[in-house]
Amino acid sequence: MGLGIRTQDLRKVYTSPPPAAAGAAAGFMFTAAKARGGRNSNKKKPEIVALDGVSLDVQPGQVFGLLGPNGAGKSTTVGVLTTRVRPTSGQAWIGNYDVWKDPVAVKRLIGVVQQRPNLDFALTAREILLFHGAYFGLPSRERTGRARELLEQFKLTDRADQMVRGFSGGMMQRLSIARAMMHDPQVLFLDEPSAGLDPQTKLLLWEIVRNYNRAGKTILLTTHNMEEADALCQRLAIIDHGHIIALGTPAELKASLPGGYLLRLRFSRTSPDLVGRLQALPGVREVKAVDGQAADLYADRGGSLVAEIVNTASAEGAELHDVHIAEPSLENLFLHHTGRSLRE
Amino acid sequence: MSWKTFSSMLARDAHVARRNFVPLLMQTLLQPLLFVFVFGKVMTASGFMPQAYKSLLLPGIMAISMVLAGIQAVAMPLIVEFQFSREIEDRLLAPIGIGWIEVEKVVAGMAQALVAGLVVIPASWLLLGQGVNLNFSRPLAFAAVALTVALFAASGGLTLGCSIGQTQVGLMFSLVLAPMIMFGCAYYPWSALKSFPILQKAVLVNPLVYACEGLRSTLVPQFPHLSTMIVLPVLLLIDAAVLAAGLSRFQRKALS
């Protein structure tokens, strides 16, 4: 049976610039040595708050999604849970093991796919799987068989005995996922698994994730792709600036959105009166003015509102310049909570 | 600690080393052997150097080969593996304490340093022919010196590998390795520096001095050398210090 994942009040403040394990681009620099030197110690170190009190509870056997824009703290959360990023405070557990008290026991239970492929470039694809299996103590015959199956499943058989240096991004990503599944972990972490995959491979990946979950495994994936979160996750946390801003099933989250439809409107000008009158239109739940010319309108209906909006606007002496209607989606939810679009 | 994990990592390093055997050999042995040829063969045969220089030179070349091989064997892959691609991560995520991953790197580096050092002996015999007088009367002392030198090389590789980035590899050679080799008493015994008293004291900070002098005292005791009673404790101290520095740097790189 799968294991649960729990974190309590995780905080992570980076004081040195390259949080390489957290997925940020590491610079080519003398690591930390200079920054920690005596002369500079009076200067304030740059502090980046990546996580600011993240508490999660993922049930065993669940597919759980962490959804948020770049830099929201998704990879850092995964880093803390997978023994690579030491939290500044707070605790994390996989099953009953405290990640930072018993990291070796935790490593035995988890499989991790990083945002960037981190394959062992000195080896061939098959060797990567075989050695990975060996690190986890799989007997020789078992790892040979399992490597063959996974290579087949991820459509890498014809390149199995080539060095991975020459692989395309998508192939590397597939191999990373195969490697993470090699030792049949109870909990699988997928950090932006479909980034860089073509649509066909993405579907293959989703199928594999679903099958793996059907075998009772717990899966935590991060994504900034709403479609993916919607398609795969049984529960979701929306994370931004190191905070969880919403938590629930995709359906619950979407239902929590006022109205569900989002109309992004642009006028020649807006006024409080106009906003007030828009608010009063039937079916409109909430209107948020954005700078002097735009408004986000949450409503129960979409296109049928447009005519009324145009009339309301002209009655106020304003002209509707642009309208974009979005159907109920997690994207809208994110926008609602943060005022920003996921892709910004 | 899991032996299976540890030995699989050693097997992985051995596998990669085997795959790169020829370039690795060239990288660590070509330069020392060219030196053996020019100074040990050309210069002695033409009479600019006495025949005895062949035997004096050999332990120094061994020490250089070991130190270069050990440092490169550990540092170069680490520099690459800790770069942007974080290749090291499949081992950081293996079910074993991070301390053991470091130990594994050091053990693998020591093995390569020892091989590189021992290969020098037959290679020099082939190159130099007659006139190399090695004295194997103190095998245990020789083994002890060789092991401490190998440990120094591998720990030095760990420290360097975790301290510098890919762009600074050239600097590592010109700023660290070249002066270390030139002032390492590899091509001359330490006592030969007595006419440069300040330099003679200054080079004592160079670990390679003890490596060369130690190998000299256990292989060619007929030449002036520092006693193993001095060399071994000093080398052990250096090993401990460099290893400690390397271990903590690795930890810092591995976790953020």
Image: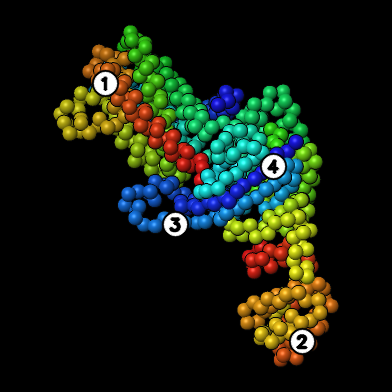
Is circle 4 on the same chain as circle 3?
yes
Question: Which residue is tagged 2?
Answer: A312
Q: CA distance from mark 4 to mark 3?
A: 35 Å
Is circle 3 on the same chain as circle 2?
yes
Instruction: For mark 3, name the chain.
Output: A
Select label 4 or label 2 by which is in front: 4
For the point 78% across and 70% down, which residue is it?
A259
The three-letter code of the residue at mark 3 reads: Pro
Instruction: For mark 1, name the chain.
Output: B
Select label 1 or label 3 by which is in front: 3
Percent of width and height locating residue B63:
36, 24
Q: Secondary structure at mark 1?
A: helix
The quadrant in which the C terminus of chain A is found is bottom right
Q: In the picture provided, is B119 more to the left or to the right than A158?
A: left
Viewer-closest of A237 and B112: A237
State whether residue A168 appears in this view: no
In this view, A293 is above or below B46 = below
Question: Which residue is tagged 1?
Answer: B230
Is circle 1 on the same chain as circle 3?
no
Residue A46, which numbered label? 3
Q: CA distance from mark 2 to mark 1?
A: 95 Å
Residue A4, which numbered label? 4
Is circle 4 on the same chain as circle 1?
no
Instruction: For mark 4, name the chain.
Output: A
